[in-house]
Image: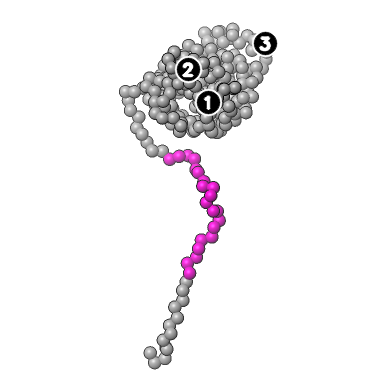
Amino acid sequence: MMHLDIIELQSFYSTALGKLAASVITSALDPLWLPMPQERLVGIGYTLPYLDHFASQAERAFAFMPARQGATGWPHGEALSTALVYDEELPLPDSSVDRILLVHTLEFSESSAETLKEMWRVLSPNGQLIVVVPNRRGVWARMEHTPFGSGRPFSRGQLLQAFREANFTPGKVVNALHVPPTRWRWLQQSSGLIETVGTRLWPLFGGVVIGEAHKRLYQGLPVLKRASRRVFVPVLTPQGTARQQPVKVKIHDHRERSGQ
């Protein structure tokens, strides 16, 4: 699954439509954001528009960005808390973070099951996972001029099933971003009214599905050894070196053939 580039994501969120989408999604995340004292927060994917809002509530926060996407520095003007990672092999010990926010990640992962199992591994007991994915029924998933029009969209049922298979206990699932993905200013200016009406009249057709889940502890996960999908080539290995041919030694018989 081809991942969006960091430049494309930054460009979108710098536009009026991108700022509108970030504002609407942040408002939908607020009711799901349970207070956690001294929480350790990790945003995975492209979560900077949302971490800027929620990181102040955390004891510490990190922005992990997938290697296929690329990374940019965050936060601005402070010590960097950014890392380039593989979402299936996070550089974190078991049960080390309290909350994970996943945006622009699950729809691009090679295996959503393995990605969610890795989230389960690094979350602390009863830790919270919040996932934002494009809605399969929504208009935004059909428009390629936004990041939500790329990758594999999810329905509410598919996201809930993915949580259960990865040993999470699903919580609230909501739809957001009912405003059409248009650059028309008059529609953007009416986004608050459209979002309110859409939430009440056609809640299942929002642009994104937002789901929260908690780490389940009473059922173990089998630990399976999986082969890495990445192939590492040692750069110092000489290429094209000819094999050494075995040396043939001819033994001469010095005995006289005649009369012997």
Which residue is disc 1 drawn over? 81
Gap in Å between the C-alphas at discs 3 and 1?
38 Å
Query: How is colour applied across the structure in the image?
Result: one colour
Category of crowding for the residue at label 3, using alpha-carbon neighbours closer than 10 angstroms: few (below 14), some (14–19), many (at least 20): few
Q: Nearer the viewer, residue 189 or 63?
A: 63
Residue 230 on image: x %, y %: 49, 40
Q: In the image, what residue type sits under mark 3?
A: Trp
Residue drawn at x 38%, y 90% as measured from the top left: 260
Q: Residue 151 bears which disc, if any? A: none
Q: What is the secondary structure assignment of the residue under circle 3?
A: helix
Query: For the residue marked with disc 1, what is the amino acid?
Result: Ser
| Residue 117, quarter of the rendered image | top left
Q: Which residues are magenta?
A: 227-247
- First in sequence: mark 2 vs mark 1: 2
Q: Which residue is mark 2?
A: 58
Residue at horizontal 62 percent and vertical 24 percent from the top: 10
- Camera-near label (3 vs 1) is 1
Three-letter residue code for mark 2: Ala
Give the Cα distance between marks 2 and 1: 13 Å
For residue 231: magenta? yes
Q: Position of residue 220 (x, y in %)?
A: 33, 28
* Residue hosting label 3: 186
Please report whichever mark, 3 or 2, sits nearer to the chain's N-terminal start.
2
Percent across and percent down for residue 94 are 39, 28
**Res 12 quadrant in image:** top right
Depth order, front residue of 65/115: 65
Q: Nearer the viewer, residue 104 or 76?
A: 76
Q: Which class describes the residues within 10 Å of circle 1: few (<14), some (14-19), or many (20+)?
A: some
- Residue at the far left in the pictured view: 218
